[in-house]
Amino acid sequence: MKLTVDISKYPLTEDYIEPIRGFIDELTKFDKVHIITNTLSTQLFGDYDDVMEALQVCIKWSFNKYGKVVFVCKFLHGDLRPS
């Protein structure tokens, strides 16, 4: 099954750029997940299990490294990446 996730991260700190970049850098370590970023969110595309594994690992990593952050996610069935 294919999955699309639209995720936004809101670090609860004045220095918000580095935690967002760090999260995206961690996501790029997962070769099976296609990533598109824009100014509002990061979009992940791929096999359900691969995308969920990347999210689980990277969200936990982010909490451990940066403390309090907010993640807002939208999960959509299928690979909805732009052609």
Image (cartoon, grey):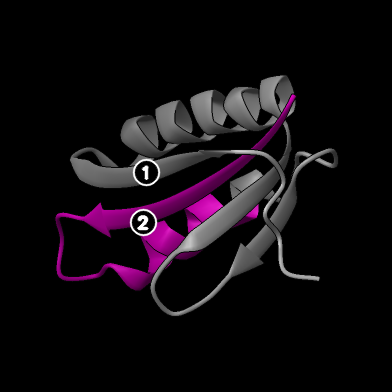
**Which quarter of the figure has residue 14?**
bottom left
List x then y, in percent, for residue 22. 51, 56
Instruction: State how many labels appear.
Output: 2
For the point 32% across and 33% down, the residue is: 63
Number of other residues with Cα within 10 Å of mark 2, as a class: few under 14, some 14 to 19, many 20 or more? some
Q: CA distance from mark 2 to mark 1?
A: 6 Å
The spot of residue 2 in percent (x, y) is 73, 33
Magenta residues?
A: 1-25
Amino acid carrying label 1: it is: Cys
Position of the N terminus by quadrant: top right
Give the residue at mark 2. Answer: 8
Q: Counting residues from the N terminus, which is met first, the one under dot 2 or under dot 1?
A: 2
Q: Is residue 20 left or right of residue 83?
A: left
- Determine contact: label 2, label 1, CB under 8 Å: yes
- Residue that label 1 marks: 73
Q: From what the image shows, is residue 83 above or below residue 46?
A: below
For the point 65% across and 32% down, the residue is 51
Q: Is residue 19 left or right of residue 50?
A: left
